[in-house]
Image (cartoon, coloured by chain):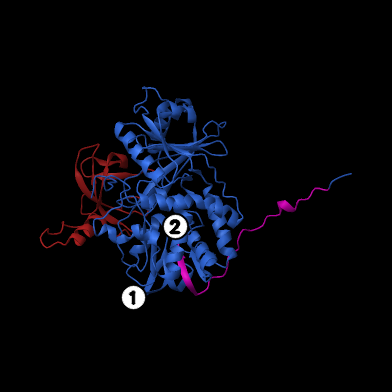
Chain colours: A blue, B red
Amino acid sequence: MTVKPSFNWLRLRRLWRPAPVRRHYDVVIIGGGIHGLATAYYLARAHGIRDVAVLESHYIGFGGSGRNTAIVRANQRTPENVRLYDEGLKLWRTLTDELDFNLMFFNCGTLMLGHSEAAVDGYRMLASTHNLLGVKSEVLDPLQCAELIPGLDISDRPAFPIQAGLYHPPGGVVRHDAVVWGLAKGAAAHGVHIHQGCEVQGIDTDGSRVTGVRTSLGTIRCNRLGIMAGGYSTAVAAMVGIELPIHPLTIQAMVTHPLKPFLHHVFSSGAYHVYANQTLKGEIATGAHMDPQVNYTNDATAYYLKHQAEALVDLMPVLRGVRFMRIWAGLADMTPDMAPIMEGHLRYDDLYLDAGWGYFGFKSGPVAGKYMADYMATGERPEILEAFQLKRFLEGRYSGETAAVMKYGHWD
Amino acid sequence: MTFRLTCPVCGKRDVYEFTFGGQERGPRPEQEELSAEDHFRWMQFRMIPCEPQEEWWYHAQGCGVWFRTTRDPGTNLEVEGDGDGDE
């Protein structure tokens, strides 16, 4: 008996289809990244608001959504942030089911390395905060770190010897492109329009209302507008004369050639400015410093390639001789307190902003979208977003994510 | 892609020799009668359109001079002949 092979599974099926641009939508969202797509998805699915357009100037996931190092975790510093990221972390499993799309959540755990007494004290405090809030974290000694990640050099040889680690088992990596595609699929299935190649060039207002946006595809009117443009949010806000306490800075990342699986956890080190994980393909994906000057480019430089090679090899000497294949950069929208800004009725009645996520925009995407959708649907700020208002910067009440207000350079 | 900036003393040098000093924003507001809110706003809030802006830079790993130049955040590059004659 011969079995006829069935090639139906090879038939390529589009996840979503482009729609014609309507001249008016109830809700327009600027930014086709994870935050914008998630907000649109939850507006349609949870609130039945389907007259929604997501405007993306390049292609969906062009910005930070497709340029981050895909690490997810909830081990933040302050209770209000831990709570938000913890819910975000739990959403990956739910969303994989809900979107019927494999987001490839690899729950491998993250290990943050400490290289000083201050760092060890800080990790004890972090672990206590996490455990108090029901989030798993524990402080490991160097030997335990090496048991988790055998390649680490825990001797006194490195420039910054490892003194302790903060192990956070609920963390891991998620395939960032899959999140973009899955959310686009889910949003489009609920009737959301996604317009790629649609660059916003201006925002129209009338008195206290936002009336629409001027784009490369013509003017699109709307009742409610959300700015969720990641690193470009400051440039978009500037179109309506809104100043923000956000600096858009490039952050660089790179991958090595593929290696046999040997690194089974995400590890990071503040002192070395390194975070790394091994992808399913076997590459070591690793991220680095930020460039100091505000910019909207995606320029990568050899300068950080060299830095990253030196830092990685010092921490993990087995990587000596391994080559980098690829380097890229993306934008991080940095706030002075390393916490985001989620705001409604921003100067105009119907203007909403979800920005300032800095390094944390990827892991927070779906949960931020969920609550921004609640905010935009009802006009009332969800309780969990109380801590992320813009006005905290005008009242000197910073989120305690960092011990001191951030300095990205020698200014401010 | 890295880029170079024009130091008024040393000429065109690699950007990593310099420290970014932020936008040129005129003189610091008078401390008297400055409300806390206005002070916070002045310290932290920025308008950063995607167009050339005048900036301060410090040649930290060079001659140590502070200078102004006009640079476009959209391209990272200096804009020729639009500064205050420093270049």
Give the image quarter of residue A1. Answer: top right
| Label 2 CA crowd tier, 10 Å (few <14, some 14–19, many 20+) | many
The magenta segment is A4-31
Earlier in the chain: of badge 1 and badge 2, it is 1
Q: How many marks?
A: 2
Q: Residue furthest bottom?
A: A207
* Circle number at residue A152: none
For image coordinates 55% across by 62% down, the residue present is: A187
* Magenta-colored stretch includes residue A218: no
**Image position, residue A184 (x, y; %):** 55, 59
| Label 1 CA crowd tier, 10 Å (few <14, some 14–19, many 20+) | few
Vertical arrangement, residue A44 with respect to residue A355, above or below: below
Q: Chain of mark 1?
A: A
Q: Chain of mark 2?
A: A
Query: Is A163 placed left or right of A194 in the picture?
Result: left
**Image position, residue A51 (x, y; %):** 52, 71
Give the image quarter of residue A208. Answer: bottom left
The residue beneath circle 1 is: A208
SS label for mark 2: helix
For image coordinates 67% across by 57% down, the residue present is: A13
Can residue A293 be seen by looking at this rendering? yes
Dot 1 and dot 2 within a common chain: yes
